Amino acid sequence: MKIALLGYGKMGKEIEKIALSRNHSVVLTIDINNPNDLTVENIKKADVAIDFSIPECAYKNIITCFDAKVPIVCGTTGWLEKFDEVVSKSKDMNTGFFYASNFSIGVNVFFKLNRYLARIMNTLSDYEIEMEEVHHIHKLDAPSGTAITLAQGIIEEIEHKKKWVLNYPSKDDSIGIKAIREGEVPGIHRIKYDSEVDYIFMEHSAKSRKGFALGAVLAAEYMKGKTGFHTMDNLLDI
């Protein structure tokens, strides 16, 4: 399979390693040094594109892939105000779009556990919910896309929670998310249900970027030749 990498930072290079180890080839890399190489003609050299760029570039990258009729796997967060538009365009243009806020298989299991616990906690109003995410200092958006996905999962299951807010405290109808940027942490997400008598605590901690990169390559393999909108639920069938 021929892959175009849109974004060639640490994640892009990790994805390249995984892709090559699985006998794929990387036919195009785009980063801050060659933005003008992002053309429909160049994208057409690939079977699938993988985008781990920056929020300011993600939308343009996606639309260029749509114009080239090349499926794109996107893991960039921080641009989601245009998400519904992109999903609609993927359907209207009959192109392939795969999005995940986190490509780690473990995190996607964590998403399921998060919803299950929230469903149980819905009627237990004595527990307040707090969230915390920790990432490396290079991460541009806050809170992380993964934290937002977790918060939205809770909101859909707990009736009195209507929104998330950046930083503590949680109160009334909101869930507070504390975003910490330090060192080279690949990603930690914590959810705490706290009452006067006890607390329930869930955490997922990534050991490296390798799990995210493998998930992105698996998604690219899945998307080759496909159209429409797809997610990790489709890939993992969980």
Image (cartoon, rainbow, N blue to C red):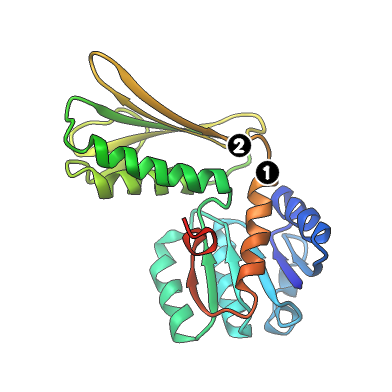
Tell me the SS state at disc 1. loop
The answer to whether residue 236 is left or right of residue 201 is right
The answer to whether residue 196 is left or right of residue 65 is left
Tell me the SS state at disc 2. loop
The amino acid pointed to by label 1 is Arg
Report the Cα–Cα distance between label 2 and label 1: 7 Å
The quarter of the image holding the N terminus is bottom right
* Residue 145 placement (x, y as % from top left): 47, 49
For the point 18% across and 44% down, which residue is it?
159
The amino acid pointed to by label 2 is Ala
* Residue 161 placement (x, y as % from top left): 22, 42
Name the residue carrying label 1. Answer: 209
Q: Give yes or no for contact between labels 2 and 1 (Cβ–Cβ under 8 Å).
A: yes
Q: Nearer the viewer, residue 130 or 203?
A: 203
For the point 59% across and 84% down, which residue is it?
67
Q: Nearer the viewer, residue 180 or 19?
A: 19
Q: Nearer the viewer, residue 204 or 88?
A: 204
Can the viewer see residue 61 in this picture? no
* Residue 74 placement (x, y as % from top left): 57, 63
Vertical side of 78 occupied by 165: above or below = above
Label disc, if present, on residue 37 of the rendered structure: none
Vertical side of 194 occupied by 167: above or below = below
* Residue 33 placement (x, y as % from top left): 77, 61
Can the viewer see residue 217 in this picture? yes
For the point 49% across and 60% down, which residue is it?
237
The image quadrant of residue 143 is top left
Residue furthest out toward the front: 237
Vertical side of 47 occupied by 16: above or below = above
The answer to whether residue 98 is left or right of residue 53 is left
Name the residue carrying label 2. Answer: 206
Vertical side of 198 occupied by 218: above or below = below
